[in-house]
Image (cartoon, rainbow, N blue to C red):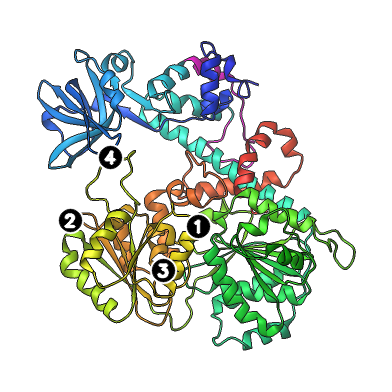
Amino acid sequence: MILSAGLEEIKGVGPKTTEALQKRGFRTIKDLLYYFPRSYEDYQSQTNIADIKPGRVILRGKIRNLRNLHTRRRNFVITQGEIYDQTGAVRVVWYNQPYRIKNFDESTTYYFTGQYDFKYNRYQITAPSVVTADEIEQKIEGFQPIYAAKGSFNSAWFKKLFEKLQPLLPQIPDLLPFEHAPSYLFQGARRQALTKIHFPKQPEDVEQAKQYLGYEELFELILASQLNRQENQKLKAEPLAFDLNLTKQFLSSLPFTLTDAQKSAAWEILQDLTKTTPMNRLLQGDVGSGKTIVAALAAFQAIKQGAQVAILAPTAILASQHAENLERLLTPFDIRTALLIGATKQKDPLKQQIKDGEIDLIVGTHAILTDDTQFSRLALCIIDEQHRFGVAQRQKLLEKVALNSHPSTADGQRITAPHFLAMTATPIPRSLQLTIFGDLAVSLIQQMPKGRQPIITKIISETNTRELLYPEITKHLEAGEQVYWICRLIEQDEDEPMEKDQHTVKEEIKRLAKIFPEYKLAILHGKMKPQEKDQVMNDFKEHRIDILVSTTVVEVGVDVPNATQIVIMNADRFGLAQAHQLRGRVGRGQKASQCFLITTGDNPPTTRLRELEKSNNGFYLAEVDLKLRGPGEVYGAMQHGELDLRIASLADTEMIKAARAQALNFASDPQNMLKYKELSQSIQKYQQLTTLN
């Protein structure tokens, strides 16, 4: 088959180039053809320099006075010069790309494409892409694809390579079935789409190509998810009977009443546990909505049926918090709880107790996953912030059940899987539930417990912090309350342009020490050792620290009820979902809490910040964020692998409905996967991406 052929089959691609491409993830001709342009440039719409305005521009001109400036920062180089045409000149700058100086001939005319903005007291075009005028003007069309560089393989190189592949396009077979398909899925649609995406004559060609290719991606993703669901139904879990009296006992021991949303979620979970088909459920709720107590009820019921439960948390301090809270809740019911983390002393005796069934509830981190941690009767796995764990780690939990010292149900059926309950505080829009998380049953907690006060959110320009922010923070510090102070960066990144307006934790703590000299400050960031991070968070929890200057590592963290104020610097650089998660670090107690969103310089508030200011509803904000930024940026970090949706839009609900209907129909006939062999191979990456088991 053409698409599965190796790169060595391409004329002009030798062994060294093949090896270099393979290192970049290209192994077959299909990998190359599905490497789509990053963007497109219409070179017929270039602007004279005298007429340019701030924003994205295309300039046709020459370059002069190009030189490299070495700054005082180690290994940081600014390459600057002038682009000029017959109407004027403009400053051009590249950061940390000193090789640029060798790439230009001052007598050659180029097309420069990039962002023209006001920076460092002057207007400039920053890091434009460049192509010679001859290369563009030899083409019949001025509408050209631009490919993201991969190492030394730049956009121009990829364009030449695709010209070599162009004769193969008419031979490409169709991938998807035509039954129950929308109108844009027809015989030859795939080869037509690949031709138009790489060799468009006009913008409409790209839109037509994206319609088919986006549908193809969604179909594969939904089909993979559905097949995972079918595979999960073949596994056997231990059925755990529901005992209403036990549930009433547990609930009556609580000092509060569950919300209706918590009761509904708990009922769905408890019903799943009674089945021999493994539960595969996602419990999602906003920060502070009460997910943990619902999980505790599920664990309680499972343990009272003689099973063991494992709760996996992403950090040691969060695991410790869960263990402490659950032990307090469950000890009155003679349930034995243990904490298993890297710092746990006397691990060997504890692991023997777990293996012998003397521990009912094991709360821990990756330490639970080690080969020498074995269980007696593990039947329920609860994963907190499940997107922080990979496929391999969840597979480990599956293997633990196979190694149970009591591996069979009462009627002799062999247990092959635990019940899985995943929890997340990142609200997932409906479109993602139907695609990426389509193999999961979803329980929602969209109601806050009584008495939880809404967090007041205020937007403040950085230029107004002295008047509007510092006095407010001082007032709460004097009242004995604590503060989170969030920065995006630890220190200036040498690979990024030097931006004076970016706050870093290392510089911010020095500045804040002068503003709040009588208070104790500490820093927290991802490059610290785990035990150092845990110590800092514990000190903050115990109020040995007043102001914690941190990166986003506190996004998912322990409860510090006395922390009532959070300041997010450069808030306009954060996504909505992440800023909302950070905001949820406060408001954990009975005191009123505030979140201050500090905009960069005197920049006006973005749409994202305005939405955050007016709403505390994470589900609403997740939908807004999806529309504003797209799924790759918002949810890429929370997937079980890389979210590789290159074309599809998860905001296109009509296309999702069409793809879902066709995929479910296709999956209903097992013979289809034998008939469509390329499709069967193609969806394997998505099956890893979507599966929880």
Disc 4 marks a residue whose amino acid type is Pro
Residue at label 3?
Answer: 585
Name the secondary structure under disc 1.
Answer: helix
Establish if 224 lies above or below 511. above
Name the secondary structure under disc 4.
Answer: loop
In magenta stretch: residue 172: yes
Q: Nearer the viewer, residue 349 or 293?
A: 349
Residue at label 2?
Answer: 602
In the image: residue 439, left or right of residue 165: right
Establish if 223 lies above or below 595. above
Earlier sequence position, callout 4 versus callout 2: 4
In the image: residue 294, left or right of residue 457: right
Q: Nearer the viewer, residue 682 or 236?
A: 236
Mark 3 vs mark 2: in front: 3
Residue at x 74%, y 44% (from the top left corner):
669
Residue 530 tag number: 1
Name the secondary structure under disc 3.
Answer: loop
Disc 2 marks a residue whose amino acid type is Asp
Q: Mark 4 packing: few (<14 Cα in 10 Å), some, or many (20+)?
A: some
Quarter occupied by residue 191: top right
Disc 3 marks a residue whose amino acid type is Arg
Give the Cα separation between the discs numbered 3 and 2: 26 Å
Q: Report the magenta residues as a range.
A: 164-186
Q: Mark 1 packing: few (<14 Cα in 10 Å), some, or many (20+)?
A: few
Mark 4 vs mark 1: in front: 1
Residue at label 4?
Answer: 497
